[in-house]
Amino acid sequence: VKLFPVILLPKEKLVDTNGA
């Protein structure tokens, strides 16, 4: 489920979704 938003959002947003 986490990969779905990660692919849609840019790199910066991806880090936020990852919780890093």
Image (cartoon, rainbow, N blue to C red):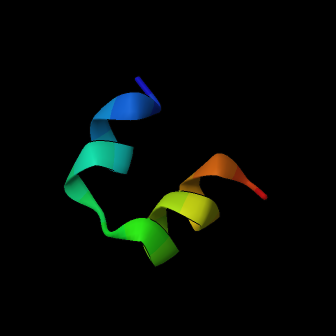
Judge by depth and name the residue closer to the eye, 1 or 20: 20
From the viewer's perspective, tell me whether residue 8 is left or right of residue 15: left
Residue at position x 74%, y 54% in the image: 19
Residue at position x 29%, y 34% in the image: 4
Residue lying farthest to the top in this orientation: 1
Residue lying farthest to the right in this orientation: 20
Judge by depth and name the residue closer to the eye, 1 or 6: 6
Quarter of the picture holding the N terminus? top left
Number of marks in the rendered image? 0
Q: Is residue 7 above or below residue 16?
A: above
Residue at position x 64%, y 48% in the image: 18
Quarter of the picture holding the C terminus? bottom right
Residue 11, given in percent of the width and then of the height, sits at 43, 68
Residue 14, given in percent of the width and then of the height, sits at 48, 59
Residue lying farthest to the left in this orientation: 8
From the viewer's perspective, tell me whether residue 3 is left or right of residue 9: right
Residue 3, given in percent of the width and then of the height, sits at 40, 31
Residue lying farthest to the front in this orientation: 11
Q: Is residue 2 above or below residue 12?
A: above
